[in-house]
Image (cartoon, rainbow, N blue to C red):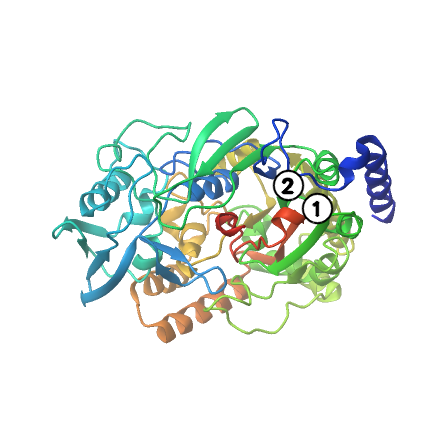
Amino acid sequence: MVLRAARMTALLAVGASLFGAACTPSSRAKDGGERPIELLVPTDAETLDPRHATDAVALRASRLVHAGLVRLDPSTLEPVPYLARAWRWSDERTLVVELRDDVRFHSGASFDARDVVATIRAFKSPEVGSRHARVVDAIGETTARGDHEVVITLQRAHATLLTDLELPILRADEAASPPRPDGSLDGLGPFVVASREPGAIGLVPAKSGALPSPAHSVTIRTVHDENARALRMHAGRADLVVNGFSPTLLPALADAPGLEVSTRPGANLTYMLARTDRGPLADVRVRKAIALAIDRARIAKTLLAGHASAASTLLPPTHWAHTDAEPLAHDPAAAQRALAEAGVLPLRLTLLTSTDRLRGTIARQIAQDLSGIGVFLEVIPLELGTMIARLGAGDFELATLQMPEVTEPNVLRVFLHSSSVPPAGVNRGRVRDADLDRLLDNGAEERAPEARRAIYASLERLVRDRALLIPLWHEDHIAVASTRAAAFRPSAEGRWLDLATLR
């Protein structure tokens, strides 16, 4: 890793000589006007249609264009008003939402209660085929009460409704339209899609959205290689990269002229997934032994350069429902005893990981840790689509994955409830545990924060005791910015709405 950092330093030096005076970031476009703020991302957005966006780039880009009734506080992740002015519960299953009257769609069309009703119905509709239909499946009825009040009635107790109402509101006559991957759906967010071509999305400030009109246009540009991203930043041709560099390269970037590096703890979880319903991994002793053998603290300190904290539970330390727990032990001797008791030594398994270089390095370190207890991993790097397909089909034994946005603890239901086993959901480990299902159901129904916190504390203890998921670490969000974008801070879940506040 030292050699790699040195190579990056050399690349930056070469970049300076190649681009000459451009080593001081330029804010001027070729035509003499101010160029957009340029955000570099490693992959293309699959779609800009918020009904169908699921990858991280698509989700974050679409939330710049569209707005929901609520948004999440960038630090606490609690729901705060956005298109809603206020709300009140009239009873346990009825929420009355008062809408803002000072917002218009990008096209100039008025925003009112009919848009909210049509949007929620569209997200629920099988004909629309939204990938986020589960978010609104607890809603029984949505009705307009005049132009600026909406009544949402639940068909069952559901604690997370306010957080769920972060889903983007579409214009009533477009809400159930065919997919619009080009981003042409009318929006209420701070930016308008001006152009989309392979590798670049052009956004311009909206004049009538839910936030004040931004000061700058934005270009979201795809640059797959991190060295190329570094050179583009160093040359002053780009302004911002969020979570796009290996942590060990950050010192070289921080020392580059005109660049700043900032970090904040992230509401995410990197974890190891095991196929729990067959083979040796169906034995809890084997799964717990693997958890004991991984030196997660050392990986966080070295390979992640201290920009991560070892995970003891599923929810990150900054989350309102986080449970304090003893650190997960690194105890290879105890792990080896457990495997001997299970009668599986030596054990050969496959570990799926991504093709990202850092993730591959981490996977090989995990393999080295496990080899010390007699578990020998074949590390298989895969492109994301191929990896997700194999996980969905159950064609795996172990995999390293990340939950990038742990905003609401009820998200764990999608990953762990028996009703979410593929193809119904993403319980790819095929976990079927009646005690866990009961806790997940209770957490989804209970609205009182303290009672919910107690439920999720019990859930986290159960998951830890039975090693149904193996938590590894929570990674920081890391922004590398030019002088123009130095004020940018990602939110706790890593989104980019702060782009609208740059001046």
Asked if residue 269 is positioned above or below residue 34 in the image, the reply reads below
- Residue indicated by mark 2: 353
Query: Left of 74 or right of it: where is 361?
Result: right
Query: Left of 437 or right of it: where is 365?
Result: right
Q: Secondary structure at mark 1?
A: helix
Q: Say if mark 1 contacts mark 2, CB within 8 Å.
A: yes
Label 1 – label 2 distance at C-alpha:
7 Å
Residue 482 seen in the figure: no
Residue kind at label 2, given as amino acid type:
Thr
Q: Position of residue 472 (x, y in %)?
A: 63, 57
Residue 341 in which image quadrant: bottom right
Q: Position of residue 258 (x, y in %)?
A: 73, 47
Residue kind at label 1, given as amino acid type:
Ala
Q: Say which label, 1 or 2, has the lower sequence index.
A: 2
Asked if residue 271 is positioned above or below residue 181 in the image, the reply reads below
Residue at the image position 17 percent from the left and 49 percent from the top: 142
